[in-house]
Amino acid sequence: MLKTEREREILRIIDERGGFATVKGLCEAVFASESSIRRDLRALEKRGLIRRSHGGAQRNENPSGGIAFSSRTVQNAAEKRAMADIARRLVKNGDIIFLDQSSSAFYLAEALMENRTLTFVTNSVKILSLLSHSEARVYSSGGILCAENRDCLVGEDAAETFARVRADLCFFSARSLSEDGVISDLSREEVLVRAAMMKHAKKTVFLCNLAKRGTRSAYVQCTLDAVDIYINESGAFDKDGNRLSV
């Protein structure tokens, strides 16, 4: 395999694996030595296509890293709307709801924004903008703009906001869900804030369309059995995998 062909194959594999692949995994996939893969990764990083980290590499889709929100909202849009339709049935009038910065949570906010009895707490700049047009009570987490996702607020201030509230429901998503049930994402800062959300909610709901299944990202959020409900476009399931009627 020529060097340029191998670089294209490396990018394809990283994309297939949810935006992150290890050096070892790439060596096995393209039948190249570790030194060759590391040289390729350095070249790809210089061109701004990937970032090397933690024994592997993750994909850059824009200058700040990650996939731009505008792109994420149109990816698998039908599946995300289907998940939002299922998730909104879990919400009762008067609930306090945590929403993370994901595009899946954005679709849920859109589905719920006419319910003026709800209280939302979010670290998503896009969701805050959306809900400014609603009559619901809306709280910003505060914090600093994430270097890797400029539509997201992170840091100690953001985490402390979620720690001071007891929510009825926390809805969140992530970049990856491995076959063995590990939920992971590309940004350590986002993972840390999301952990505070999950800890201070009575019930946690993971929104993850099936296209993400079988992928891994750099930073582990939790395992699937640590959430109360898992929703994909086909339905809602409890931590044991049993389908729920919602």
Image (cartoon, rainbow, N blue to C red):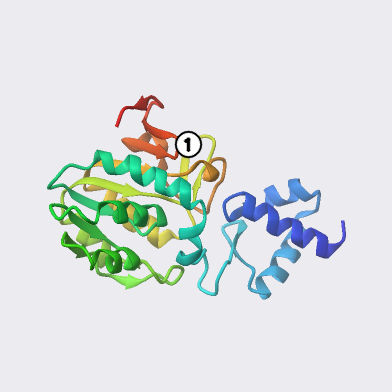
Residue 117 point in image, percent of width and height? 12, 52
**Residue 154 makes an appearance in the image:** no
Which image quadrant is residue 234 in? top left
Residue 181 point in image, percent of width and height? 47, 36
**Residue 239 makes an appearance in the image:** yes
Q: Quadrant of the C terminus?
A: top left
Residue found farthest to the right: 2
The structure residue drawn at horizontal position 50% and vertical position 73%, both measured from the top left corner, is 64
Q: Which residue is identified by label 1?
A: 181
Amino acid under label 1?
Gly
User: Which of the pair 77/192 is nearer the observer?
Assistant: 77
Q: Is residue 218 left or right of residue 106?
A: right
The structure residue drawn at horizontal position 75% and vertical position 66%, both measured from the top left corner, is 39
Q: How many marks?
A: 1
Q: Is residue 122 left or right of residue 16?
A: left
- The residue carrying pointer 1 sits among few (fewer than 14), some (14 to 19) or many (20 or more) residues within 10 Å by Cα, namely some
Residue 45 point in image, percent of width and height? 66, 70
Q: Quadrant of the N terminus?
A: bottom right
Q: Secondary structure at mark 1?
A: loop
The structure residue drawn at horizontal position 16% and vertical position 49%, both measured from the top left corner, is 166
Residue 54 point in image, percent of width and height? 56, 58
User: Which of the pair 47/208 is nearer the observer?
Assistant: 208
The structure residue drawn at horizontal position 70% and vertical position 64%, both measured from the top left corner, is 41
Query: Where 212 sits versus 56, above or below?
Result: above
Query: Where 6 sits versus 46, above or below?
Result: above
